[in-house]
Image (cartoon, grey):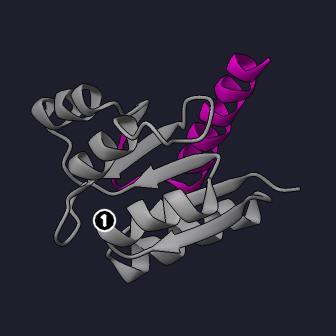
Amino acid sequence: MAEKILVVADDPAALRLVSFTLGSAGYQVIPAVNGVEGLRRAQEEAPDLVVLDVMLPGIDGFEVCHRLRSNPAAPQGRLPILMLSAKSQEADRAMGEKVGADLYLPKPATPEEITAAAGSLLSQREECDV
């Protein structure tokens, strides 16, 4: 069974690009268009990885990441979180680390960079589960 990746992005073009890229690499993609939906789908779908935009309507990606990290009902093991954002200042990266992101990838990211980052985080998770 393919690993499940939750992609949370409000920009339709970015959501399509990331979803297509990861789907083409053999992953099962679960889309979400805002932070609230992302949190709900994370709980319902138990993804293996979350790809999270920072600038989201309502609840931003930093808050979504924080809530995912502080949820005591989260699935066993540590859910890897890849933040993918146009906000590329050092303060943004530091905030991503502070709220628990495993990797912060600035946009624009190539399909190869996205696939490599997802693969790396998923393989690290598998090593931790062994």
> Which residue is the site of mark 1?
35
Residue lying at 22% horizontally and 49% vertically, measured from the top left: 63
Q: Is residue 117 left or right of residue 95?
A: right
Count of all numbered marks drawn on residues in the image: 1
Residue lying at 52% horizontally and 77% vertically, measured from the top left: 16
Q: What's the amino acid at mark 1?
A: Gly
Q: Is residue 97 left or right of residue 122?
A: left
Q: Is residue 23 visible?
A: yes
Work out whether 66 lies above or below 7: above
Residue 107 on the magenta span: yes
Residue 24 percent across, percent down from the top left: 74, 65
Residue lying at 22% horizontally and 32% vertically, measured from the top left: 93
Residue 65 on the magenta span: no
Q: Quadrant of residue 70?
A: top left
Span shown in magenta = 104-130
Residue 34 percent across, percent down from the top left: 32, 72
Residue 94 percent across, percent down from the top left: 19, 27
Residue 82 percent across, percent down from the top left: 45, 42
Work out whether 82 lies above or below 31: above
Between 104 and 100, the residue placed more toward the observer is: 100
